[in-house]
Structures are given as C-alpha cells and as structure tokens.
Amino acid sequence: MAAWLSREGIPFVKRDVRADPEALEELVQGGFRSTPVTMADGAAVIGYAPAALRALWQAHGRPA
C-alpha cells in the first residue's frame, strides 16, 4: 500500500496499529476491524483498492 501511494505521488502518514496503541484505539473507535484503512478528511477506504483510493484523492480536490 505504501509503495503504491508513493508511486502515485499521494502523500500519506503510515501508522502501525501493531506498534502504536493510539493508532489501534483510533481504528477501533472508528468502527474499523481490519487494515489497511486509508483516511482523508473523514472519508475512508478499507483494504487495498487503487480505484477507490484514486477516487478519494480526487474527491478531495487533488489532481489525478
């Protein structure tokens, strides 16, 4: 996922829920039970879904 985001030129912050208890708590509090979860301005894409990630990126005013 990180490699794909980098290749696409999409900036991101990677958080490891196995190593970061706060990140895990945020994931659970958000109602998510699996990873990866990609968030942008409150919208989420669950799993590795390139088309959905591109759509999320574009929906938030970023160029394709």
Image (cartoon, rainbow, N blue to C red):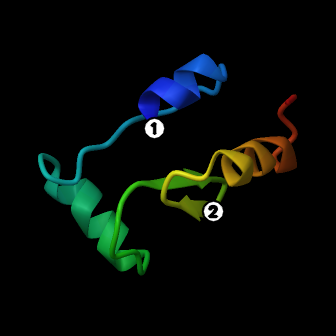
- The mark tally for this picture is 2
At mark 1, the secondary structure is loop
Percent from the top left, x then y, of residue 56? 74, 51
> Is 21 placed left or right of 37 in the picture?
left
Amino acid at pointer 2: Gly
Q: In this orientation, which residue lies closer to the viewer: 8 or 62?
A: 8
Compared to residue 60, the image places residue 10 above or below, namely: above
Q: Residue at x 22, y 53 (%)?
A: 17
Q: Nearer the viewer, residue 42 or 37?
A: 37
Label 2 neighbour load within 10 Å: few <14, some 14-19, many 20+: few
Q: Amino acid at mark 1?
A: Met
Dot 2 falls on a residue whose secondary structure is: loop
Q: Is residue 37 left or right of residue 42?
A: left
Residue at image coords 22%, 57%: 22
Q: Quick one: label 1 or label 2, which is nearer the N terminus?
A: 1
Gap between marks 1 and 2 measured at Cα: 19 Å
In front here: 55 or 50? 50
Residue 31's x, y, as percent? 42, 81
Position of 37 with respect to 18 (left or right) is right
> Is residue 55 shown above or below 31?
above
State the residue at coordinates (48%, 59%).
Answer: 47
| Residue sitting at x 40%, y 54% | 36
Q: Is residue 34 left or right of residue 40?
A: left
- Of residues 21 and 47, the one nearer the viewer is 47
Report which residue position mark 2 lands on: 42
Q: Neighbour class for label 1 at 10 Å: few (<14), some, many (≥20)? A: few
Image quadrant where one finds the C terminus: top right
Residue 1's label in the rendered image is 1
The answer to which quarter of the image holds residue 11 is: top right
